[in-house]
Image (tube, helix red, strand yellow):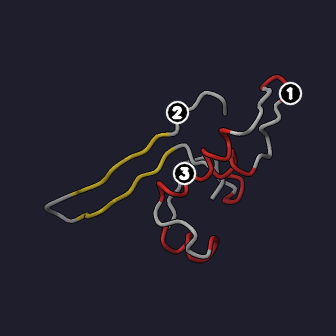
Amino acid sequence: MPCSDTKKQTPYFIDWDSTNHNDYGNKFKDTDDFLFFHLNNLSDTTMDVSLRNVEGNVDVDALPDGVYRVQEASDEKLTYDIRVNDHHQW
């Protein structure tokens, strides 16, 4: 979900399973599938940063700055992974 949809400039969290079900009809098997889908679309996009033609691009807007996935959280254990979008084009 793009930051513009949440009207927030600070980090926020969403329930991926609900978002995938409600917004995408379970189109993506996991967050990686979602990220690769949009990154693959962008690989075919001609970009001209001086014209800022990436503003409003649905794939650019869909990509989060990072994805945190918590697999287990308890008083005894925290299991998680992080993906950071560090692409310098957008």
Quadrant in which the N terminus appears: bottom right
Query: Which residue was labeled with disc 1?
Result: 51
**How far apart, in angstroms, are the residues tagged by discs 1 and 3?**
25 Å
The relative height of residue 74 versus residue 41 in the rendered view (above or below) is below
Label 1 and label 2: CA atoms lie apart by 21 Å
Q: Label 3, on which residue? A: 35
Inter-mark Cα distance, 3 to 2: 13 Å
Name the spot of residue 58 as percent of width and height, x first: 74, 51
Q: Is residue 39 left or right of residue 66?
A: right
Which amino acid type is shown beneath numbered disc 1? Leu
Secondary structure under tag 2 reads loop
Q: Residue flagged by tag 2: what amino acid is it?
A: Asp
Disc ID at residue 86: 2
The quarter of the image holding the C terminus is top right
Which of label 1 and label 3 is nearer to you? Answer: 3
Residue furthest to the left in view is 76
Quarter residue 7 falls in = bottom right
Inspect the image, locate mark 3, and give the three-letter code of the amino acid beneath it.
Leu
21 sits left or right of 57 in the view: left
> Image point 79% across, 40% down: which residue?
55
**47 in relation to 20, above or below:** above
Q: Residues within 10 Å of mark 3 (few under 14, many from 20)?
A: some
